[in-house]
């Protein structure tokens, strides 16, 4: 059956201006890090993407190495885009990244001009696109001069292969340098993608203020701390969970009793708000205007419903904020 997007899709979502740019992003964006590679049935990925767009999620976030195996998420997304979403291409924000290991040898990693431009060319080919809306440098390179990396990002915009430039995982000091270089080159940074959740608050020390001051948007990845800020682990580690799977990104050792106790207490507050813990955790990341969007993953359409449902109650009272801070400040 030919896909036709839901006619009411733009009434579900809240759209927030990305820094001082002219671009607005949905408050909830969908990341294709997991569940879109060759290990997932294509029809499952297709249903997730269709459902997300029907809910007004217009931003799909990828990277060269998403899968598994690396590259397969972009290839599968490209097929679904061609078969389902081509009529809607101009309603979508599609992003990709390069900065982690993608191919063997010295030119398949980090931040050289050689790697970044070659990687974007490969990503465009896999997805069947002429351009991406946002192209990120995925992580800072300790060896390549920052000027070289930023010049490569500026170059792909001037080539028409990307409309906007983003940074990811840059600490505040490196971000400040990078933003200044991009500004001087005439291709200002649109957005920064840091890891940010109730359990990982490093961005609050300096980075979020810097981005706001510079007119740069931000999109928080891993806002649910890999599932720790859901009800998934409140009563032990389920056999089918990520923590039980041997994932390098979340293992059973990280699910400590102290963390579980925090999650239980947070879950009680969420209950008084009429929300699931996952919904409250997303709302908390969006509680101020410094964060443009939360980037979620999903393996079921119900998770998308929950995330978007959070938008109807994303404000916090001062008392709720104090209670949440008290819980988060408990020792791990």
Image (cartoon, rainbow, N blue to C red):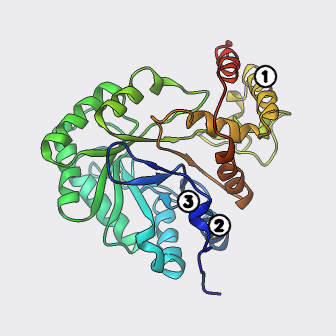
Q: Is residue 326 visible?
A: yes
Precedes in sequence: disc 2 or disc 1: 2
Quadrant housing residue 189: top left
Is there CB contact under 8 Å for labels 2 and 1? no
Position of residue 68 measured from the top left corner of the image (x, y, whole percent): 55, 58
Is there CB contact under 8 Å for labels 2 and 3? no
Q: Which label sits in the foreground, 3 or 1?
A: 3
User: Residue at the spot x=78%, y=22% of the render?
Assistant: 261
Tell me the tag on residue 124.
none
Precedes in sequence: disc 3 or disc 1: 3
Camera-side residue: 24 or 276? 24
Question: Mark 3 = which residue?
Answer: 57
Tell me the tag on residue 51.
2
Q: Is 277 situated above or below 317?
A: below
Camera-side residue: 172 or 69? 172
Q: Is 305 situated above or below 218?
A: below
Quadrant housing residue 11: bottom right
User: Residue at the spot x=50%, y=62% of the render?
Assistant: 58
Neighbor class of circle 3 (other Cα within 10 Å; few <14, some 14-19, many 20+) is many
Position of residue 277 measured from the top left corner of the image (x, y, whole percent): 74, 37
Q: Which label sits in the foreground, 2 or 1?
A: 2
The N terminus sits in image quarter? bottom right
Position of residue 21 measured from the top left corner of the image (x, y, whole percent): 32, 48
Q: CA distance from mark 2 to mark 1?
A: 34 Å
Q: CA distance from mark 2 to mark 3?
A: 9 Å
Precedes in sequence: disc 2 or disc 3: 2
Position of residue 179 measured from the top left corner of the image (x, y, whole percent): 24, 37
Question: Mark 1 = which residue?
Answer: 261
- Whether residue 302 sits left or right of residue 171 in the image: it is right
Mark 1 residue element: helix
Mark 3 residue element: loop
């Amino acid at each position: 059956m030919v896909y036709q997007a839901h006619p009411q899709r733009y009434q579900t979502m809240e759209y927030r201006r990305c820094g001082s740019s002219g671009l607005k992003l949905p408050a909830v964006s969908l990341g294709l890090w997991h569940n879109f590679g060759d290990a997932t049935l294509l029809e499952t990925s297709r249903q997730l993407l269709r459902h997300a767009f029907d809910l007004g999620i217009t931003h799909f976030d990828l990277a060269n190495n998403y899968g598994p195996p690396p590259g397969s998420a972009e290839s599968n997304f490209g097929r679904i885009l061609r078969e389902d979403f081509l009529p809607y291409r101009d309603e979508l924000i599609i992003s990709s990244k390069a900065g982690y290991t993608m191919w063997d040898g010295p030119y398949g990693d980090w931040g050289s001009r050689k790697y970044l431009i070659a990687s974007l060319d490969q990503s465009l080919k896999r997805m069947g696109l002429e351009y991406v809306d946002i192209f990120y440098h995925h992580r800072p390179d300790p060896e390549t001069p920052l000027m070289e990396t930023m010049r490569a990002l500026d170059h792909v915009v001037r080539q028409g292969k990307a409309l906007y430039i983003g940074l990811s995982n840059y600490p505040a000091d490196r971000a400040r340098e990078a933003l200044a270089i991009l500004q001087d080159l005439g291709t200002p940074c649109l957005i920064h993608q840091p890891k940010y959740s109730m359990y990982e608050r490093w961005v609050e020390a300096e980075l979020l203020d810097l981005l706001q001051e510079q007119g740069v948007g931000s999109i928080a990845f891993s806002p649910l701390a890999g599932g720790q800020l859901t009800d998934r682990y409140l009563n032990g580690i389920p056999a089918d969970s990520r923590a039980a799977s041997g994932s390098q990104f979340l293992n059973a050792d990280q699910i400590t009793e102290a963390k579980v106790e925090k999650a239980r207490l947070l879950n009680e507050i969420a209950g008084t708000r009429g929300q699931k813990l996952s919904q409250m955790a997303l709302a908390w990341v969006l509680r101020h205007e410094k964060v443009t969007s939360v980037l979620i993953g999903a393996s079921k359409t119900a998770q998308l419903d929950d995330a978007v449902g959070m938008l109807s109650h994303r404000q916090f009272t001062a008392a709720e904020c104090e209670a949440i801070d008290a819980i988060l400040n408990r020792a791990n």
